[in-house]
Amino acid sequence: MVKSPMKKDAYLEHWNNRKEQYKRVQRDPLRLKYHLQPPMGWLNDPNGLCQKDGIYHIYFQYCPFYPEIRSIFWGHMTTKDFIHYEEQEPAVYSDSKWDCNGPYSGCAFQEEDTLYFFYTGNVRYEDGNYNYVTDGREQNTILVTSKDGFTFSEKRLLMKNEDYPSDMSKHVRDPKVFWEHGHYFMIQGARSRKDEGSVLLFESYNLTDWTYKLRFQPKTSFGYMWECPNYLKIGEKKFLIVCPQGVAADEYEYANKYQCGWFLLDYDFEGTDYTLGEFHQLDRGFDFYAPQVFQDETGRWILMGWMSVPDSGYEEPTLAQGWVHALTIPRELYVNDVGLLCQRPLKELKGLRQEGYRGSLQTGLDLGTSACSEVIVTFNKRSEDFQMYLRESVRLKYEDGVLLLDVRGCGSGRTTRGLKVAELHKLQIFSDSSSLEIFINDGEDVFTTRIYDSMRELHIQVEGKELDGEWEYYPY
Ligand code: FRU
């Protein structure tokens, strides 16, 4: 026995009964000004990111009637500039026996004029005493296609748990499809029965028949489950992005409940030999998980992540207003001169800037700015200790080669996060009503976090001994 699916007409009825909630959500002062956020209810992972005929399609895990009804859909928004987002009807409903507990995360793969969406159909049995790890659950790989990103074909079941390697638990999900070495590949996040996380690699010559090829896994086990894998190639460098669960914290490393980061991958997509480099965290803040990457029509690799981490247990004050969570700003991925995968804010965001100001960095600087703004601080003399207050209750401190973010004053349970930075030369800070994204040294690292203060101002105060540098400020 499984939960009954929710079809489109039932969805629309629930939606129409919640028009008041929808209006209340839009009035919440914690609503973000330039981030993608749910029209109401709950949002998690970005899905199916793609650009078709000039329009960017951003689908996402969406539970608009949360917490009363916990059905997941693929929500849908479009944008042409990453500044204005348009709400669209959900793209995928939980309306079949293969995905009655939710169309879980997945990707878009584009070929000629067709978009192929691959996702995980989640099914939870309700008629027994299950542990839901090795039994009681189905994770089906499903395909839907579309010519325009707005209307979708029938669902087609491609793989089920029996088609995954036999030592896997029931947790195999989040397909990402790409073209390499003359044919198609699919990666999926996985948990084995021995609680080892890995990425499973499948191959295909027609996008519908898939054969298991191998698994990517480091020599020593690194967490019990890996979610939301991504693969990308920049120049000759290949990267695997994954979200491992069950990695123990180690001083400043792996401080969140679940992690997200990248490995350099050395693999020719032919034989079975590969090597994975070291794991690098993609973000150092409290709220970053399940990012998805895609290449747009200009060939840029764009990343958007979920601005939260599952099971982290923070209070989310927006819930009382009828909504929760958001996606990060879009970021362009690039490889820097020492071979690190870095993130820089998409250049389109410059379109948000109003007339700016600039000045030189001095101790005692006190800059009263708008909460929705961008601030760039450039240090001429690298590695000078300093501290900066952002919005009074957020402190960023650099001391003895450690950059420390302290949001105890407004983090709703979030405390401090640190990072070793041998040489600090640049900070680029994106502040929105209830979020902060701090890009360090041109995006070698990022701190992404939600904050909930009543201050509607970003109030920057800088203190340090021999500060030498510049600041730029742009209200949004
Ligand atoms: C990651 C995740 C995915 C899954 C989805 C369900 O946040 O757990 O693995 O597909 O969320 O909403």
Image (spheres, helix red, strand yellow):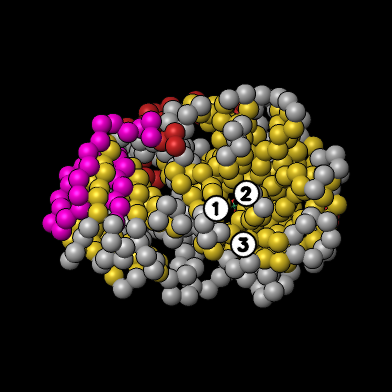
Magenta span has 351? yes
Q: How far apart are marks 3 and 1 (CA)?
A: 13 Å
Front disc: 3 or 2:
2
Which residue bears the numbered disc 3?
263
Mark 3 or mark 1: whose residue is earlier in sequence: 3
Q: Name the residue under label 1.
A: 335
- Which is nearer the N-term, disc 3 or disc 2? 2
Helix, strand, or loop for circle 3? strand
Q: Mark 2 points at which residue?
A: 234
Q: Which of 437 and 402 is in front in this view?
A: 402
Residue 370, numbered circle: none
Residue 4 on image: x %, y %:
68, 40
Q: Mark 1 and mark 2: span between their CA atoms? A: 7 Å
Q: Does the magenta stretch include residue 447?
A: no
Instruction: Categorize mark 1 by other alpha carbons within 10 Å: few (<14), some (14-19), many (20+).
Output: some
Element type at mark 2: strand
- For the record, the magenta segment spans 350-379
